[in-house]
Image: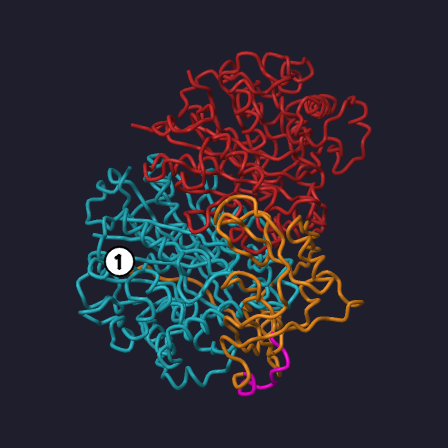
Chain colours: A cyan, B orange, C red
């Protein structure tokens, strides 16, 4: 198995509606990543290009249309598509392209353009539900999150105020992120007073519809060593998909995240994640989800992530805890579905390389993970990077 | 990250005012899905005012929605089971937002309802009705664990769809 | 040292124009049960699962959600590739080559009959700003390409029609084929024009069905039951689908994929390397274009060779002895899996009345259909 290094990363601004087309967004991110890696397209053997529902860009088989912008013309291109989990899965797919020995280098690009969908991108998600037993009910994407959040709060007795603090933390973290349009200093009261979307979800607990793209460059060890600098390596990857029968599961705990995390830890030789993971980017499309995922990632006991949040354990400047979402996450930077998770992978890369600028965590970091979630509360995708 | 970030933000207004060029397309994206054996039976039973589950002798689970194969045991499931049309709320929400993100004045109350007669934890997605029109009213009437009962459409209005049940109401 | 990769189990359903008796879950379950039985394995023996598909071909946003249950893959590593069967095969191959996954399952299916307006779905793949705005039936892309191909190569319309005749005739011997027929070239040429020079009987009609394959690393073969068929190489290439800038007569994506696949499988003389080939024929002219891109015929000579019977089932190089998409049905992304199944059966000597004598190495060539310029090439061989 070939060792795989991350040589560079790039991204666009994350905005509610971009002037740029999907192709142009891909190009901006891909060329920024190549520039960061000190490479050109000639050095790239293959492309992993991901984007989540075709319904957003409004193009069927959308990566065929986007591929010119992602540098994939005339190259092998694969699109892994696992809903919201796609951004981390794309990095994992880039890993297997290179680790298999089939390709020396891989350009990983994640794009999402949600703004084209009319009347509102949220509507595109209606079709995620089962067409016979669920869609006729007049379903809404928010339901599956609010139902899960209610269950999680009930089973573990978690106050709404604590969940609101995730939004406060991440939006504050995002003030240091140049791509973000949503960084803000909020109070818990402001979050709790924001309009009720689907109780217990309030507006300021939800990451917004966003357009954007992110790219990474991966390479095998031989290629990476030519570059001469200290590298960030992929140490472990994992993914798992739970049953589509989501109403038959207890939503209070994400088993699929646990399975994905355990697979990644095993590959990385990690036996004590709470000691060996120094920084984490858990997927945070909704405020409570970050906590839910931190538990699935084994970084906190079931029901305990909220308590640790209250203690400052997940704060960016902690020296005794594990900084979570130092980027500002989806809540703070934005949520262009597939690109959002790759943004989190890029953040771990920047943190481990000491390139995170204002967002650099205080504690010494040698190993970090990024995690994404997707589908009907089903997909867990995890990647562990280390120096 | 030292690279200059690009990406130009537009506003909703920029489209309406014609500041940017845009192309629109509306296609006939329609499907007629084959329900197959399990769901076909399930939908037929709904027309008759019944909820059907399917039992697997391998793991002993009675599942709803029914499936002809057990995804845990990876074998064919074994028998049809007529379930009750009552259950308990596993989780619920109070939604003031429509599918297209427009606001509602009165809420919808989606819920996962564990159906009596199926194995524990076997829930279906449906709506709870007759529980009030404000957040406060609903939160006073609905809780996790609440026993509920299906409210059916009259037989002549049933189509063999999940909406043959109008909603569930507190028992 | 590169690990060998083999297909040790193949499962499938028959291919039919409509399949109202079974949901997609039930079709895939049937194929999966057969595949595991064939391999002598259970889902617990599998390390990773790969599914191929496209949302709009199924009518579900994020079709990945509905993949694990019918494969026995709940809470296991499963992921979906929006790509065709050759790309899926490539992914399965790479997963095994990492050394982390010893047994991998590949699944693909079609419920094309459930799409009420396939032309609208196909049109949705066109560039929204420049190509879709015309409102033309998307087959215009194939019509344009066919026109240019005929013009540059001197291929005649009769020669193209013979591809449809050959493939539908071959399908008569394939029990799972959806559209076997004994046609004449005149009937094909007399069929309704769709996007001239493209005619209706030159377009593969859609069908429903499912395929599941079990692949294993060479070191795992002892515990598998199915007779292994080796995947010597897999390559896939995406070229731009941008209409104004593409090559309108050559399948450049196939040329590049073939170059990679031949190099990896150490094939220097493609014209004598293969016992049979399963080549995309979603439109009859595509088979000819692909044959030339694969180097199995000189440029412009594929049409003549078809006319001469060179690629007939009993000819020197049988092409689409399964019946191809024209004879079996167009299965969207799962088309090459039909070809892969044929390759497995041929190389195991299990192809019955279709058996190519002494079959030892086969070729699969795929294309993702209008409006893409994406496709792949795979080389398979039996145990030496």
Magenta stretch: give its range: B128-138
* Residue B167 belongs to magenta span: no
Image point 53% across, 35% down: which residue?
A: C375
In the image, residue A172 lies at what x, y percent?
A: 33, 76
SS of the residue under disc 1: strand
> Number of labelled discs?
1
* Residue B135 belongs to magenta span: yes
Of the 4 image quadrants, the one containing the N terminus of chain C is top left
Q: Is residue B95 left or right of residue A356?
A: right
How would you rate the neighbour count of disc 1 (Cα within 10 Å): few for under 14, some for 14-19, many for 20 or more? many
- Depth check: give the residue in front, C6 or A2: C6
- Depth check: give the residue in front, B101 or C58: C58
Q: Is residue C163 visible?
A: yes
Image point 70% across, 71% down: which residue?
A: B152
Of the 4 image quadrants, the one containing the C terminus of chain C is top left
In the image, residue C237 lies at what x, y percent?
A: 48, 36
Above or below C119: residue B17 = below
- Depth check: give the residue in front, A76 or B16: A76
In the image, residue A70 lies at what x, y percent?
A: 45, 48
In the image, residue A334 lies at what x, y percent?
A: 42, 67
Q: Is residue B76 left or right of residue A49?
A: right
Q: Is residue C155 visible?
A: no
Provide the residue designation for mark 1: A368
Above or below C280: residue C372 = below
Say which chain tag 1 marks.
Answer: A
Q: Is residue A183 left or right of residue A209?
A: left
Quadrant in which residue C218 is drawn = top left
Q: Main secondary structure of the magenta part?
A: loop
Q: Is residue A30 left or right of residue A324?
A: right
């Amino acid at each position: 198995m070939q060792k795989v290094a991350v040589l560079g990363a790039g991204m666009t601004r994350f905005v509610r509606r971009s002037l740029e087309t999907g192709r142009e967004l891909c190009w901006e991110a891909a060329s920024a990543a190549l520039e960061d890696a000190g490479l050109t397209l000639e050095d790239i053997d293959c492309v992993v290009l991901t984007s989540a529902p075709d319904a957003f860009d409004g193009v069927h088989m959308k990566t065929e249309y986007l591929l010119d912008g992602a540098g994939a013309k005339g190259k092998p291109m694969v699109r892994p598509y696992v809903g919201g989990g796609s951004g981390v899965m794309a990095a994992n797919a880039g890993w297997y392209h290179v680790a298999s020995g089939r390709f020396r280098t891989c350009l990983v690009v994640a794009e999402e353009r949600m703004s084209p969908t009319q009347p509102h991108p949220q509507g595109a998600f209606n079709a995620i539900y089962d067409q016979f037993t669920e869609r006729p009910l007049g379903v809404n994407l928010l339901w599956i999150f609010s139902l899960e959040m209610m269950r999680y709060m009930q089973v573990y007795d978690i106050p709404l105020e604590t969940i609101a603090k995730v939004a406060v933390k991440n939006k504050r973290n995002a003030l240091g992120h140049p791509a973000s349009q949503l960084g803000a200093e909020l109070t818990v009261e402001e979050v709790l007073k924001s309009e009720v979307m689907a109780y217990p979800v309030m507006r300021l607990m939800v990451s917004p519809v966003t357009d954007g793209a992110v790219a990474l460059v991966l390479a095998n060890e031989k290629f990476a060593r030519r570059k001469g600098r200290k590298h960030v390596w992929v140490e472990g990857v994992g993914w798992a998909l739970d049953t589509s029968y989501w109403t038959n599961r207890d939503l209070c705990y994400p088993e699929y995240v646990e399975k994905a995390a355990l697979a990644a830890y095993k590959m990385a030789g990690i036996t004590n994640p709470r000691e060996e993971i120094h920084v984490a980017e858990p997927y945070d499309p909704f405020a409570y989800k970050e906590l839910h995922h931190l538990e699935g990632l084994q970084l906190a006991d079931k029901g305990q992530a909220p308590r640790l949040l209250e203690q400052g354990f997940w704060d960016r400047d902690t020296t005794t805890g594990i900084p979570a979402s130092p980027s500002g996450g989806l809540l703070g930077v934005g949520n262009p579905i597939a690109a959002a998770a790759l943004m989190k992978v890029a953040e771990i890369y920047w943190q481990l390389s000491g390139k995170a600028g204002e967002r650099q965590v205080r504690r010494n970091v040698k190993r970090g993970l990024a995690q994404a979630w997707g589908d009907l509360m089903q997909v867990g995708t995890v990647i562990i990077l280390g120096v | 990250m030292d690279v200059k970030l690009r990406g130009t933000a537009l506003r909703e207004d920029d489209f309406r005012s014609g500041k940017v060029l845009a192309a629109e397309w509306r296609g006939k994206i329609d499907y007629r899905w084959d329900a197959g054996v399990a769901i076909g039976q399930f939908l037929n039973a709904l027309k008759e005012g019944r909820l059907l589950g399917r039992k697997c002798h391998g793991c002993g689970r009675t599942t709803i929605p029914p499936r002809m194969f057990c995804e845990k045991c990876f074998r064919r499931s074994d028998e049809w089971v007529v379930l009750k049309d009552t259950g308990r709320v596993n989780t619920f929400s109070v939604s003031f937002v429509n599918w297209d993100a427009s606001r509602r004045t009165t809420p919808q109350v989606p819920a996962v309802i564990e159906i009596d007669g199926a194995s524990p934890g076997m829930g279906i997605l449906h709506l709870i009705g007759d529980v009030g029109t404000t957040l406060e009213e609903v939160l006073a009437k609905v809780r996790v664990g609440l026993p509920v009962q299906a409210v059916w459409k009259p037989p002549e209005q049933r189509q063999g769809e999940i909406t043959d049940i109008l909603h569930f109401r507190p028992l | 040292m590169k690990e060998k990769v083999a297909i040790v189990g193949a499962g499938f359903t028959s291919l039919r124009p409509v399949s109202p008796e079974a949901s997609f879950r039930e079709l895939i379950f049937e194929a999966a049960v057969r595949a595991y039985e064939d391999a002598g394995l259970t889902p617990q023996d599998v390390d990773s699962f790969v599914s191929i598909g496209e949302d709009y071909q199924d009518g579900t946003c994020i079709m990945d959600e509905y993949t694990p249950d019918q494969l026995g893959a709940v809470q296991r590593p499963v992921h979906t590739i929006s790509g065709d069967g050759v790309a899926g095969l490539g992914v399965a191959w790479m997963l095994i080559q990492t050394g982390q996954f010893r047994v991998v399952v590949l699944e693909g299916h079609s419920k094309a009959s459930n799409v009420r307006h396939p032309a609208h779905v196909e049109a949705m793949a066109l560039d929204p700003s420049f190509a879709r705005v015309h409102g033309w039936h998307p087959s215009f892309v194939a019509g344009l390409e066919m026109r240019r191909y005929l013009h540059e190569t001197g291929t005649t319309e009769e020669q193209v029609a013979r591809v449809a005749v050959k493939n539908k005739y071959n399908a008569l011997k394939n029990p799972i084929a959806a559209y076997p027929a004994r046609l004449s070239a005149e009937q094909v040429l007399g069929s309704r024009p769709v996007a001239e020079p493209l005619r209706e009987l030159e377009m593969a009609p859609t069908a429903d069905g499912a395929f599941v394959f079990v692949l294993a690393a060479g070191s795992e073969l002892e515990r598998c039951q199915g007779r292994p068929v080796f995947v010597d190489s897999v390559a896939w290439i995406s070229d731009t689908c941008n209409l104004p800038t593409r090559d309108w007569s050559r399948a450049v994506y196939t040329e590049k994929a073939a170059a990679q696949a031949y190099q990896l499988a150490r094939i220097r003389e493609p014209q004598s390397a293969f016992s049979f080939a399963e080549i995309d024929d979603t439109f009859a002219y595509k088979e000819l274009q692909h044959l030339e891109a694969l180097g199995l015929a000189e440029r412009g000579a594929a049409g003549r060779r078809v006319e001469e019977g060179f690629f007939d089932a009993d000819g020197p190089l049988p092409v689409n002895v399964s019946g191809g998409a024209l004879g079996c049905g167009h299965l969207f992304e799962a088309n090459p899996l039909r070809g892969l199944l044929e390759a497995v059966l041929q190389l195991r000597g299990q192809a019955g009345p279709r058996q190519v004598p002494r079959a030892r190495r086969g070729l699969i060539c795929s294309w993702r259909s209008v409006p893409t310029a994406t496709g792949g090439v795979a080389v398979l061989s039996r145990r030496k």
